Image (tube, grey):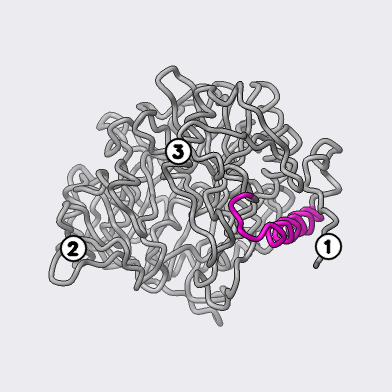
Amino acid sequence: MTFSKNLPTDLLAYLGLSVPTTIFHNLEPAELITNSLQNHEGVLTNTGALAVDTGAFTGRAPEDKFFVKDDYTAESINWNDINQPISSEVFKNLKLKMLQFCENKKLYVADVAACADPIYRLNVRVIASTAFHCLFAQNMFIRLNEEEKEIFQPEYTVLCLPEFEANPEVDGTPRKNFAIINLSEKTVIIGGTGYTGEIKKGIFSVLNFLLPKEKDVLSMHCSANVGKQGDTAVFFGLSGTGKTTLSADPDRYLVGDDEHGWSERGIFNFEGGCYAKTINLSKENEPDIWNAIKFGAILENTRFFEGTNEVNYADSSVTPNTRVSYPLHHIPNALEPSIAKHPKHIFFLTCDSFGVLPPISKLTSGQAMFHFISGYTAKVAGTEVGVKEPKSVFSACFGAPFLPLHPAQYAGMLGEKMRKHHVQVWLINTGWTGGPYGEGSRMKIPYTRSMIAAALDGRLGDVAFHAHPVFGVLVPVEVPGVPAEVLDPKNTWANKHAYDLASNKLADMFLTNFEKYRDMASEEIMAGAPQVLEISNS
């Protein structure tokens, strides 16, 4: 049997793992890349990044993610179609099969950490059958120095075997792929899928349980950055709304692009890297992400221009969910450590494909809580099989797939912190203007950046606002660097009557979705809901 340098023979004994043929422990990124190339897991691009394919799964499979339901979790987790229960017995048997599967195989082990604030640090050991999954873990979590590696003790373990498939008829899973979180055993097992995001989101789900429940820390699906004067901004949003793009601002310091905690001390990044979508990536619109794709970064499911190793970012032939992972130090203005003061501005990002919501609007406290609990964005035709027209998506707290507790717990914590720290909340529509998807056009990124910059530096303080007739949010009449006609969405539509009908339709969707939260909503929150107007159909 062979081992990597300084490897204790009992490294994985706590799992009950029989010793595989070879264990590679805490290899440097360059060593992992070399191993990945030797294993034919990927190839290098012209910028030095490692390009890999994740197999049949090019995104998360939320219908195949489970929490073990036991005495610890039975009364704590908000069980639903997202937080699905599975028995301890199923977990135990699957884990045993995975460990047996590892016998006489080589494994890669990465010791990393989550949470930049040392008070909340969580040590995570990632064990994978492929080198690039461990490189992903090193990119996305916080890397340890040599002293930290010497004294490392894992608090949570992730066992990721993409080639191991469950037998649904025997193992008790719906399909061959699975991601199961056992909070009592402090173990995550992932099989049948090579999508690296399952590792990241598994630990994110763990933190979303532990921090609010046991540490009184609000966990958030958001990006964050800091201005030169130390002013912190937070960006909530679902996938595709611009969290990574808009937080990667060359004029501000990046805290992180996806997952943060908000404690009594301020905010802190859970991660040590970024996991950005790359479809239609351009150097002009997203220079920081473009320049971060170099040696050490991992590109997933992209394709090259024919006959070259230059990536064609417009190619969605494998998936529109092409991605890149890279460590934070690939961003020149990344904050180190990734800890910042309490935010003064929060931006809710939505990609409204109906073209109804203003590109920027100011929210009252009640509106902020209503929109946070709603977590709205929209999918457009063609993004999913069967989607013929824009489809509304409501994901509570802008991160329902990763929230084990009831949304009211996260919303209540956010409301308290907003009031305590006098935070201004803004709604940003990065979606369509001038009409719905298919008729209008996508909001230009430079316009969105200008609007956010104006909000952050106070230039909207003396600007007049008017209330949107349906949603009630306050819309500025002018923003430096942005054409005035873009700011009022109705004015961008050629058919004003069609806009009014679309506004009412979207408002109805919001109200219908919110029915399940009405019983726990205060009068202030319900006052922030949209009001459907009486409109003639003629």
The circle drawn on residue 478 is none
Q: Position of residue 522 (x, y in %)?
A: 84, 38
Residue sitting at 62 percent across and 34 percent down?
A: 476
SS class, disc 3: helix
Residue sitting at 59 percent across and 50 percent down?
A: 399
Answer with left or right where residue 235 lies relative to residue 296: right
Residue at the disc numbered 2 = 43
Q: Would you place residue 318 above or below residue 485 in this image? A: below
Asked whether residue 87 appears in the rendered view, the answer is yes
Q: Position of residue 242 (x, y in %)?
A: 47, 47
Residue closest to the eye, 278 or 440: 440
Q: Residue furthest bottom?
A: 169
Q: CA distance from mark 1 to mark 3?
A: 37 Å
Q: Return the disc, 1 or 3, that comes first in the chain's sequence.
A: 3
Residue at the disc numbered 3 = 449
SS class, disc 2: strand
Magenta segment, which residues?
491-516
Q: Return the disc, 1 or 2, that comes first in the chain's sequence.
A: 2
Q: CA distance from mark 1 to mark 2?
A: 60 Å
Q: Position of residue 341 (x, y in %)?
A: 51, 21
Q: CA distance from mark 3 to mark 2?
A: 35 Å
Residue at the disc numbered 1 = 536
Give the quarter of the figure containing the C terminus: bottom right
Q: Would you place residue 499 above or below residue 447 in this image? A: below
